[in-house]
Amino acid sequence: MNFLSQFFKIFKNLLKTPICDNCLGRNCGNLLSGMTNKQRGEIIRKYFAFVIDSEEEMDFDKSNFYGFKFRNIKLKINDSKKCSVCDDFFKKNINKIIDSSVKKLKNIEFSTFLVGSIPTNEMKLNEEKLWENFGVNNVELIKAEINREVGKGIENITNKEFDSKNPDVILLINLKRNEIQTQIKSIFIKSGYKKLVRGIPQTRWICLECNGKGCLRCKGVGKMYKTSVHEIIGKPICKYSNGKDHVFHGSGREDIDARCLDYRPFVIEILKPLKRNIDLKKLEKQINKSSKVKVNGLKFTDKDYVRKIKQATNDKTYSADVIFTNNINNKFLPFIKKLNKSIINQKTPTRVKHRRADLLRKRGVKSISYKILGKNKLRIKIKGQAGLYIKELINGDNGRTKPSIQELLNNNVEKIILDVIKIHKVK
Ligand SMILES: [Zn+2]
Ligand SMILES: [Zn+2]
């Protein structure tokens, strides 16, 4: 059968039951552009009105031609009937959906959006029935038409842009449950931080005793530490952007008791922000009022950058003030130089063993130097390959790291005061 007779047959059949212009037009929705399915449907309906008025034998539902003025045939049509496919969704309900959607978006700041929808079971079944009878050539899905038409409606009212790739907000129209949900894209902000004090962790650490509810151990605050780099940076941004919460993504981390005196890259992610146009300069100033943490310019970024900084392997230079149990034996001191450009064998440190697999790690010392601060005190400067455990290199971790400074000096390490002083750029 050629296209023309096939086409004619399809639409002749469709008109046997009440059907609206949108549902009619959707059956050739993939033919021609620059018009809506409603317009396609109108054209087809008019075309068949000509056919009918020419007194061609045809079986059709009269209500489909309500309002037409036929010249040659006498048809008594009292009323139009509800569309047997969409139940008049496009005629009656779609504007309500558009209005509710706009209301939903009212308190959200966004410039681009996307619409997704879940049609009712009836709509889907009716749609599938049509395909069974007439095939799916040139057909558009009802879902696609709902998304587009609601999207156009929202565009007209809000002047915001429909964006299918990376929208600020996604509206999910669930016709099954008769509800509209919004998904707001996170805001990602990048910078580097310095941690100028010891004793605060990088990320918020929920109290292990009460799981955040508040208990005696945490004095009711629900956290192991009062504050963190994460909170000092994230809280003001989250408050300003009216977000639901914030997540910290750091490029590695220093120990709680170590300072970080070079800017360590991080991304702060604000979840479900109601405000996206935020003054980063102002927030930077606000954060930098902290005596504990400083940031180095805030910039907008995206999710991909999080992966990038997570995978980055930067060499680092540390300065460690080390106190030994006994006076240092000057005879052994030069042995430290042996570590220069050497490879260190490190089994997973005892302090992190509970959360990491027990592996043997080999990492290089790129350079090492020391300065005598006292009879039992040294300042050691170490440039280490990314991933080198510094504390363990110094204290040997009960023989789990070899060689170590404790072993070389034959002197027990009492205390290590550690600073990250340089995070080297990856070349
Ligand atoms: Zn319809
Ligand atoms: Zn607690």
Image: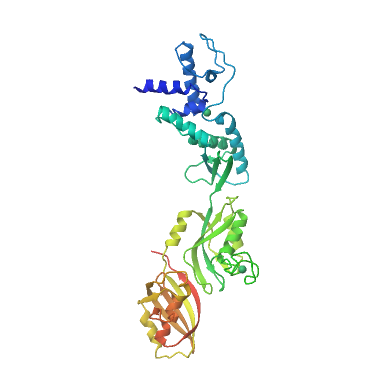
- Asked if residue 254 shows in the view, the reply is yes
Identify the residue at image location x=47%, y=72%.
352
Identify the residue at image location x=42%, y=90%.
330
Identify the residue at image location x=51%, y=71%.
261
Front in this rendered view, residue 208 or 132: 132
Q: How many labels does the image show?
A: 0
The colour scheme used to paint the residues is rainbow
Vertical comparison of 63 with 413: above or below: above
Percent position of residue 393, x then y = 42, 78
Q: Quadrant of the N terminus?
A: top left
**Looking at the image, which residue sits at the far left?**
1
Identify the residue at image location x=57%, y=60%.
234
Front in this rendered view, residue 101 or 359: 359
Percent position of residue 162, x then y = 52, 40
Q: Quadrant of the C terminus?
A: bottom left
Q: Is residue 245 left or right of residue 166?
A: right
Front in this rendered view, residue 291 or 147: 147
- Asked if residue 30 shows in the view, the reply is no
Vertical comparison of 109 with 71: above or below: below
Percent position of residue 369, x then y = 42, 80
Query: In the picture, residue 239 is in which quadrant?
Result: bottom right
Query: In the picture, residue 129 is in which quadrant?
Result: top left
Q: In this view, does 57 lie to the left or right of 270?
A: left
Front in this rendered view, residue 76 or 66: 76
Percent position of residue 149, x then y = 53, 34
Vertical comparison of 320 with 90: above or below: below
